[in-house]
Amino acid sequence: MHILAIDTSLGQGSVAAADPAGTSERPLGPAGDHARVLTEAMAELAARRGWSTPTSPFGEFGYGHGDVVAVVRGPGSFTGLRVGVTTAKALAWTTGARLVGVSGFDVIARTTARLTGWQRPLAIAYDAGRGEVYSTIATPDLASPGGWSLAPSSLLVGSDWIASLPQGAAVSGPALTALGTLASARGDLQIAPTEAWLPSAAEVATMAAAYAIAGRCDDPATLVPEYLRPSYAEETRKPVP
């Protein structure tokens, strides 16, 4: 199985190419560059893995081989998620590769557990702007191919989220970049190391392999991003009388 994985959900995205011989990963740089460099970055990684041919930068990727294109479907920014999800869907359509959309919450839970050894519920939050966070609880789940189940997500004031965490809670996620000092001030929380706070394409590739083996793939026609909050137009739309 060959896997191309994309994460453009946050400001610093990445892509990865994985096969049975190993994984190669490349950062994408600032969010404003993602659309411009994404295809080039994937082609570079395919060449690094030895997939490319004189006639195709991706070689035989997807064509009858059960290969996978994976993407973080959210949470994340409007523009970033549209770039990543649209690119992944287009690649799946054109090559026949299977499509796997994964939650950034799942990716962060897996990374946090790998780096810390924690096998317990994790409180994970993204910075949603306006002083708010988009949060969930990830619980170890052996029945899930990714290894975690997610509680329904909620949008909360950041300080309220910190205050709501139970005694001794394990905490991770991008929101800690802004709220780490407040979380540390509680004293009782277990805070994941900073390298676990963000998703990475290499971890996405690992998760996508498990989902694909379990037959948990997505339809390119129906996969949609999970945004951090409704768009401004949706928030201000007045109900029809």
Image (tube, rainbow, N blue to C red):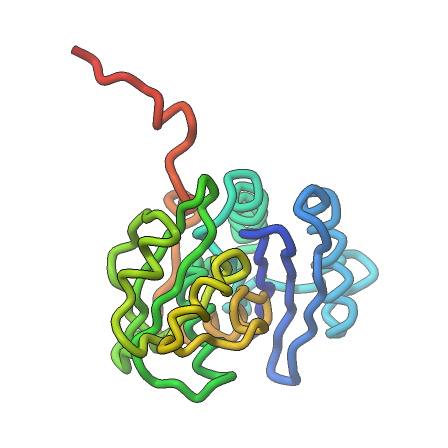
> Which residue does the image show at 65% across and 85% down from the upper left?
21
**Residue at x 35%, y 66% (from the top left corner):** 216
Most distant residue in the left direction = 241
Point out the image quarter for the N terminus: bottom right
- Taking the view exactly as shown, the residue that stands out farthest to the top is 241
Q: Nearer the viewer, residue 161 or 138?
A: 161
Give coordinates of residue 160: x percent, y percent.
31, 53
Q: Is residue 96 left or right of residue 145?
A: right
Q: Residue drawn 57% across and 45% down?
A: 80
- The answer to whether residue 44 is visible is yes
Closest to the observer, 92 or 111: 111
Is residue 2 visible in the rendered image? The answer is no
Q: Position of residue 75 (x, y in %)?
A: 44, 52
Quarter residue 203 falls in: bottom right
Q: Position of residue 118 (x, y in %)?
A: 39, 85
Residue 98 on image: x %, y %: 47, 60
- For residue 222, above or below residue 111: above
Q: Is residue 30 left or right of residue 193?
A: right
Q: What is the quadrant of the C terminus in the image?
A: top left
Looking at the image, how many numbered discs can be counted on the residues?
A: 0
Give whichever of 101, 53 is nearer the camera.
Answer: 101
Quarter holding residue 146: bottom left
Viewer-proximal residue among 181 and 4: 181
Q: Is residue 138 left or right of residue 5?
A: left
Name the residue: 45% across, 61% down: 104
